[in-house]
């Protein structure tokens, strides 16, 4: 999926919402546990209910791996379900991978060729040769961690070098030498507020994947105020706040309502462009 | 497996070798492809042949994930085979995971409870709350990336802050506040030579997992000269240099010879302590 297609989705559907499929068997409605594949049944119903209000889905691999082999099968079935039924939705595998070149090649094959997702989150610590193998795939996206939404983001990402450049800024600047706005995005937490201004100085046009709205406390309006571009430039993720909106039979409907509420806020922000 | 048990293994077997099980169907002897699970058959024979000369095994998840569901099953079977047949060997899942606390919890459950490995490699970029969930497991180890063996390690890991502290040094220093020498190790590439001296100034007693001897060009003697401690303090990994020593029927024997050669060099280094 290319940049133009992503932008078209956003403006035609008036949404830049990504629904995070952090599916945890302890948190889904318990009546689903009688299903053969409860996690897939949950995902399927959440997807069908929320698809009109979002333009992307982001399953986090940790949740599927924690269910063992069956969980990986559920992940695969979910990706296939999305590709067959919602081919215009952007699919992000949130896996935060990254290894030496030889090994990153294997991850790239796995996610881009075998699972066939559109994009993958990548950790930058190991530098250029850990990221480049993913950029070799035409039409696929690297979403590099820059400034994350968690408290620990302050431990290393904000470290200033001798010239006053912070680590996340260096990650942004260096990585623009490896890819461009057509094959790279960056993770920037919604909790980072005004920092979006600093980020836009380095990557004015790149899309940012923004987790942390909702359960983690980030504000959509603040993210838009400081991070939005003429082409939107934002994909804002909400996971727990949407998918666990209700534990009852109405869970999918409740998720749809949460997604719709965010979509409506997003439509207002898009009109300001 | 606790620190004392690891040290006892090293000195009783006179080896601090870890064999990296980077099992790639394109690189294993092709006659194995007729087996029902070629990757497991390869691992089993490599393990049986090299076990006398090493004290640890390190499967890299990328190689198993790239084989899809079957690959994850192979990984699981390999771990179970090790635990049943070689219970004194230390098992490292080389997965380089790391996510926000909520999600790292899921990875910790997956690797430590379900797969039951002894240790997991972790990427530090997301800071404290991405690492701590793994440290909550008694008798398990976090092996944090510090200074990796690849060319890209220079991109961010060597960045000096305003006080002259490099990022990998900050990772070492900060993380000693989260865990200690009984539940943390660090990845330091064998290609880093004299840098081991700088690392030992910050973590004089911690074990270091050292990849990069062999195919990546690091020198065992140099690693020992600058990185060894009174309790050894090193686990040196070789993957491709051992497991792909031969493509013939003798592949396991050839791997054993490569492992034995390294073990003999290691015995000499251990005698110097």
Image (spheres, coloured by chain):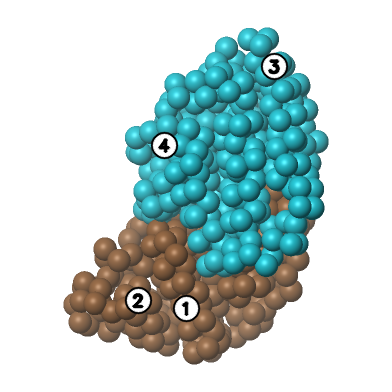
Chain colours: A brown, B cyan
State the quadrant of the C terminus of chain A. Answer: bottom right
State the quadrant of the N terminus of chain A. Answer: bottom right
Q: Do the residues at discs 1 and 4 belong to one chain? A: no
Residue A58 bears which disc, if any? none
Determine whether label 1 and label 2 are within 8 Å by CB: yes
Task: Identify the residue shown where x is 74% and y is 74%.
Answer: A138
Q: Which residue position is annotated with label 2?
A: A37
Residue found farthest to the top? B272
- Neighbor class of circle 4 (other Cα within 10 Å; few <14, some 14-19, many 20+) is many
Give the number of the mark in front: 2 or 3. Answer: 3
- Residue A251, can we see it? yes
Task: Identify the residue shown where x is 50% and y is 38%.
Answer: B86
Task: Identify the residue shown where x is 65% and y is 40%.
Answer: B49
**How far apart are labels 1 and 4 at the CA level?**
32 Å
Q: Do the residues at discs 1 and 3 belong to one chain? A: no
Q: Which residue position is annotated with label 4?
A: B140
> Which structural element holds mark 1?
helix
- Residue B271: which quarter of the image? top right
Q: Which residue position is annotated with label 3?
A: B269
Residue sitting nearer the eye, A21 or B1: B1
Percent position (x, y) of residue A153?
48, 45
**How far apart are labels 1 and 3 at the CA level?**
51 Å
**How far apart are labels 1 and 2 at the CA level?**
10 Å
* First of labels 1, 2 by sequence position: 2
Q: Do the residues at discs 2 and 3 belong to one chain? A: no
Q: Do the residues at discs 4 and 3 belong to one chain? A: yes
**How far apart are labels 4 and 3 at the CA level?**
27 Å
Identify whether B270 is placed above or below A132: above
- Neighbor class of circle 2 (other Cα within 10 Å; few <14, some 14-19, many 20+) is some
């Amino acid at each position: 999926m290319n940049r133009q297609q992503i932008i078209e989705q956003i403006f035609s559907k008036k949404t830049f919402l990504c629904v995070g499929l952090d599916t945890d068997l302890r948190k889904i409605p318990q009546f689903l546990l009688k299903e053969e594949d409860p996690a897939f049944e949950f995902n399927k119903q959440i997807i069908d209910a929320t698809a009109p209000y979002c333009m992307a889905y982001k399953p986090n691999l940790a949740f599927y791996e924690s269910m063992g082999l069956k969980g990986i099968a559920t992940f695969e079935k979910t990706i296939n379900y999305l590709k067959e039924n919602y081919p215009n939705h952007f699919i992000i595998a949130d896996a935060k991978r990254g290894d030496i070149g030889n090994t990153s090649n294997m991850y790239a094959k796995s996610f881009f060729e075998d699972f066939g997702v559109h994009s993958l989150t990548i950790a930058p610590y190991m530098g250029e040769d850990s990221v480049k193998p993913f950029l070799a795939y035409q039409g696929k996206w690297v979403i590099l961690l820059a400034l994350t939404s968690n408290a620990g983001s302050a431990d290393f990402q904000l470290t200033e070098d001798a010239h006053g450049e912070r680590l996340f800024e260096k990650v942004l600047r260096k990585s623009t030498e490896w890819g461009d706005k057509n094959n790279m995005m960056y993770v920037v937490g919604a909790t980072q507020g005004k920092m979006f201004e600093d980020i836009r100085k380095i990557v004015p046009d790149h899309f940012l994947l923004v987790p942390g709205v909702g359960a983690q406390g980030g504000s959509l309006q603040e993210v838009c105020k400081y991070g939005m571009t003429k082409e939107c430039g934002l994909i804002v993720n909400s996971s727990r706040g949407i998918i666990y909106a209700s534990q009852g039979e109405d869970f999918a409907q409740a998720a749809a309502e949460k997604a719709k509420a965010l979509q409506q806020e997003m439509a207002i922000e898009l009109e300001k462009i």
